[in-house]
Image (cartoon, rainbow, N blue to C red):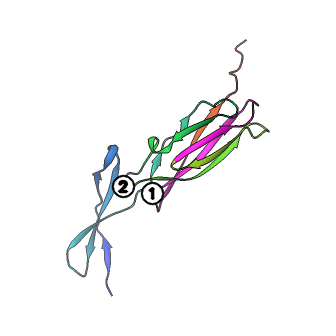
Amino acid sequence: MFKTTLAKRISIVAAAAGLAAARIPLASAVAGRATEATANIRPICNDLIFNLPGVGETVTIPVHEFAADPDVEPVKLVAVFAVFNSVTKIGTAKISGNDLVFTLTSSTPGTVYLYWTISDGSLNATCVAWGTNELPPDNG
């Protein structure tokens, strides 16, 4: 039976874009020497605000500009879910390649929240993009 134990120290090495990947030294009882393995780190994404388009028009959000993986693995847009603050569904959201596409379908004022999920193939991260066409409140 082979036994591998984690060493007591964990070192952090820099990766792309100022992000870090954890490198965990492993002690191997078989070889009698230490080896190093990299733990997969969850991808990250930034919440964003966008302007709602006119009725029948679309907004395309290139997800790769707002998402990254600390392990420098490519991320893919895997899901989108739209929530509206009005009674009326005011638009539709879909995935097109690695872009998030929202189409406004109603002139009813409202705010839309697009919850989008990215994946590096094994771990996911979810962020939100939101836009509104509501007028600001009157200041009197």
Determine the residue located farthest toward the top in the rendered image.
Answer: 140
Q: Position of residue 4 (x, y in %)?
A: 31, 77
Residue 28 within the magenta-colored segment of the rendering: no
Residue 12 position within the rendered picture, expressed as x and y whole percent measured from the top left: 29, 54
Q: Which residue is mark 2?
A: 71
Position above or below: 51 against 113? above
Q: Quadrant of the N terminus?
A: bottom left
Up/down of 68 relative to 133, above or below: below
Q: Which residues are magenta?
A: 99-125
Quarter-wise, where is residue 22 in the image?
bottom left
Q: Secondary structure at mark 1?
A: loop
State the image quarter where residue 139 is shown: top right
Does the magenta-highlighted stretch encompass residue 122? yes
- Which residue sits furthest bottom? 1
Rendered residue at 66%/45% (across/down):
82
What residue is shown with label 1? 120
